[in-house]
Image (spheres, rainbow, N blue to C red):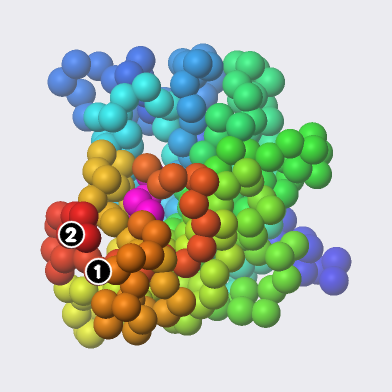
Amino acid sequence: MKREEEEGSVDKQDVTFYLFNSDTRKKGDNLRRISLDCKKVNANLPIKMLIHGWMDDHSSYWYKPTVEEYLKKGNVNVVTVSWGKHSKNLIYPTVVKAVRSVGQHVGDMITEISSKYNVPIENFHLIGHSLGAHISGFAGKTILNQRNLKVGRITGLDPAWPSFEKAVPEDRLCSNDAHFVDIIHTDAGGAGYAISIGHIDFYPNGGVKKQNGCSSLDLGCSHKRAPIYFYESINSNHFVAVEASSFTEFDCGRCNHNKRAIMGENVDKSVTGDFYLHTNKKSPFAKGPI
């Protein structure tokens, strides 16, 4: 047990954080990584924190477009998290052991930012893909245990399923980790979580592989779609989903009079349940109002 804890421990310096907002960009420059020590956090704006998963790092395919969409939207701080020293390990079980420790470091950084810049904990929105979704959950648990406070929102982008299939809520992302938890499932039962674990769970194209437009030869395509759908949603309200008990019920048109919900950034936090939608084969993926 002690050996496993040592194997799963992550040094604080192995998890790095970079800030983006309107004050961190020079005219004509590409996005730059700015240390949080630069004191550029705008305490009056919400903080979006992006957390990658396995075999990913600060150069993640979804970080730059997500940051760009948020800066286009404006009035926001974006913090990208990098834990590549541990995530870029081909031995998946070893990476899984690091997830809780990384989450604790993320929670500690949120507390530090909150105290240093006087940002309410409720202003934090954690957005995690795959193992990053569970890291978000452990960050939320850390803050809840230490301060009896909850972050405002956690968005789980196809939370990892392998090694978490039988995990109790204390050992994975769950709806108690934030005031509002929304989940986008795109490879349910494969790389992604197979059951609903948020206040609201979205299942585009049934939530399983292969997602519309994905090739059978690209095994990771469906799992990677969740972050793409999300960053497309930041400046769009066109991912309209319908409440249903199953994708079959939705697909057969039996739910035309059921509740609607917008998937992604602009979700209505007062709406809960399981929601289904279709997407296009290529970007823009949102089909628009139903």
In this picture, is 268 found above or below 246?
above
- Residue 85 located left or right of residue 287: right
What residue is drawn where x is 39% and y is 59%?
A: 259
Q: Main secondary structure of the magenta part?
A: loop
Mark 2 lies on residue: 287
Q: Secondary structure at mark 2?
A: loop
Asked if the magenta segment contains residue 23, the reply would be: no
Q: CA distance from mark 2 to mark 1?
A: 7 Å
Q: Quadrant of the C terminus?
A: bottom left
Residue 29 pos. (x, y %): 20, 23
What residue is drawn where x is 69% and y is 53%?
A: 176
Mark 1 lies on residue: 278
Q: Of residues 279 and 19, which is closer to you in this image?
A: 279
How many C-alpha atoms fall within 10 Å of the one at disc 1: few (<14), some, or many (≥20)?
many
Instruction: Please give the range of residues in magenta.
Output: 261-265
Asked whether residue 36 appears in the rendered view, the answer is yes
Amino acid type indicated by mark 2: Lys
User: Are dots 2 and 1 in contact, CB under 8 Å?
Assistant: yes
Q: Secondary structure at mark 1?
A: loop
Residue 84 pos. (x, y %): 48, 53
Q: Residue furthest right?
A: 2
How many C-alpha atoms fall within 10 Å of the one at disc 2: few (<14), some, or many (≥20)?
some
In this picture, is 28 found above or below 230?
above
What residue is drawn where x is 32% and y is 19%?
A: 22
Residue 193 pos. (x, y %): 51, 73
In this picture, is 107 found above or below 238?
above
In this picture, is 89 found above or below 71?
below
Choose top left, top right, bottom left or bottom right for residue 98. Answer: bottom right
Q: Which mark is residue 178?
A: none
Residue 219 pos. (x, y %): 31, 79
